[in-house]
Image (cartoon, helix red, strand yellow):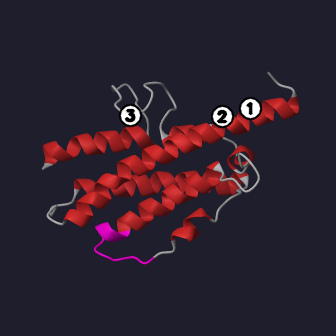
Amino acid sequence: MESTLQPFLDILREVYVGAGAQHTFVIDNAPDTGILSTIKNISAKEASTPSHDGGSTIAAHTGHLKWSLDYAMEFFNGNQPHWDWNDSWKRIAVTETEWAALQEELTEAYNRIAAATKNVKDWSHPAFVKGVLALLPHAAYHLGAIRQLMLIVKQHKKSTTGLQ
C-alpha cells in the first residue's frame, strides 16, 4: 500500500506546500504556487476583500480548507462528525494577527492529515478511501479559487490606488 499511497501524498503536498524542486502534476512548477505559500503572500486586508458585494474572500476559503481538514481528521480518528458546513465559511474577514494564526492552523491541519494518511493500516472501507481521495480535488479547487480571488483583489487594489 505504501507505494500506492506515496503518489497521493506527493500530490497533496504539491497542492498544499508547492512544488519545491520536484516536477509538478497539478500546479505550476514555480515558487509560491501551493496553497500555503500562496496565502503567505497575501495581507490580511487582501484576504478579507471579497471579489464583489457578498462574494467570498480568501480568508473564507482558507478557513473552509482548515475546517475540511479538521473534519477529515475526525474520520481518521474513528469519529463520525456532524459539523455544520456553513460554519466553515463564517470567517470572512481577519486582522493581521488572525490571518497569521489561520495560516498556521491550516499548515498544522495539513501536517496532521499527511501524517495520519501515512499511518492508515486499513483501507478496506470505500467511503473512507473516497473521503481521503476527495482531499485532492477539494484542495485544488480552493487553490484555484484563492488564486483567482488574489488576482481580482490585487487588480482592484491597483485600480483604486493608481498603481500599475
Q: Residues within 10 Å of mark 2 (few under 14, many from 20)?
A: few
Residue at the (47%, 75%) spot, across then down:
83
Query: Given the image, on which type of amino acid does mark 3 rest?
Result: Val
C-alpha gap between disc 3 and disc 2: 19 Å
> In screen coordinates, is 155 left or right of 82?
right
Question: Magenta stretch: dominant SS?
Answer: loop
Residue at the (22%, 43%) spot, across then down:
6
Query: Given the image, on which type of amino acid does mark 1 rest?
Result: Gln
Q: Is residue 116 visible?
A: no
> What span is in magenta?
74-82
User: Does the magenta-highlighted stretch encompass residue 139?
Assistant: no
> In screen coordinates, is 147 left or right of 21?
right
Q: Are marks 3 and 2 in contact (CB under 8 Å)?
A: no
> Where is residue 27 drawn, in percent x and y?
43, 32
> Where is residue 110 drawn, in percent x and y?
41, 53
Q: Disc 3 or 2, which lies upstream in sequence?
A: 3
Disc on res. 155: 1
Query: Given the image, on which type of amino acid does mark 2 rest?
Result: Leu
> In screen coordinates, is 156 left or right of 84?
right
Q: Does residue 154 sit above or below 51 in this rendering?
A: above
